[in-house]
Image (cartoon, rainbow, N blue to C red):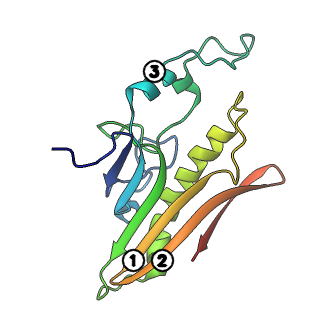
Amino acid sequence: MDLGLSELFSSRIQETVYQLGETEPQSFNPRKQPDRIHGLQLTTKLENILQQAYAHDDPLQHPPRLTEDVVTTSMNLENGGDPLLFPFLVLEAKSEKGPQNFESMEIQTAFPIKNALKLQYDLLKTRGNTMDVPGGPFVWYLANRGEDWRVYGATVYEEEGRPNYVSVQN
């Protein structure tokens, strides 16, 4: 029976998000585990692309590398399963009767959202990327507390050559 689920998308439930480049957190904080993160699944086509030689290396500076050696695709490279690639949606929910408010949910998910934006930003800035992306990197964030819902959009803009991360709530 076909449930109508796409093999292109995947998600993680309450998976700890580490700082990019780390395989273990400096100090474990379970509050950095969003309820769910959605991204792309590693398909055969995408895996083949990542296994190809990176075409934009300067042979005088680098020995030949694979695309997967140049492009970071996941926030948690060593999660014990298939990686969640280029996350784009973060979900967090709390009980209406619980002590957490929307501000505490924003704090809990800020780090994972920033990491997801950084992955997209780094991809955009990868040498050889000529794709013009209108608006640039973008991550959705949905939060609900009981029946109250908030929708956020997070993006990156450059100021003086450095990335700045911005989140807007609607």
Secondary structure beneath label 3: helix
Q: Amino acid at mark 3?
A: Asn
Say whether residue 60 is left or right of residue 84: right
Proximity of marks 2 and 1: CB atoms separated by less than 8 Å: yes
Establish if 126 lies above or below 66.
below
Q: Earlier in the sequence, mark 2 or mark 3?
A: 3
Q: Quadrant of the C terminus?
A: bottom right
Of 19 and 73, the residue lying toward us: 73
Q: Amino acid at mark 1?
A: Asn
Of helix, strand and loop, which one carries label 2? strand
- Farthest right residue in view: 160
Q: Position of residue 93 (x, y in %)?
A: 35, 73
Residue ID for mark 1? 144
Rendered location of residue 125, percent (x, y): 70, 38
Please report whichever mark, 2 or 1, sits nearer to the chain's N-terminal start.
1
Q: CA distance from mark 2 to mark 3?
A: 38 Å
Q: Residue 31: horizontal and vertical position, in percent? A: 38, 66
Residue at (29, 37) in percent of width and height: 81
Foreground pick, 26 / 150: 150
> Residue 150: which disc?
2
Q: Residues within 10 Å of mark 2 (few under 14, many from 20)?
A: few
Give the residue at mark 3.
Answer: 48
Distance from disc 2 to disc 1, alpha carbons, whole Å, reads 6 Å
Mark 3 to mark 1: distance in Å? 38 Å
At x 48% / y 77%, what residue is drawn?
150
Q: Reading the chain from its start, which is encountered first: label 3 or label 1?
A: 3
State the residue at coordinates (73%, 56%): 157
Query: Could you tell me which secondary element the residue under label 1 belongs to?
Result: strand
Residue flagged by tag 2: what amino acid is it?
A: Arg
Callout 1: few (<14), some (14-19), or many (20+) C-alpha neighbours within 10 Å?
some
Left or right: 53 in relation to 81: right
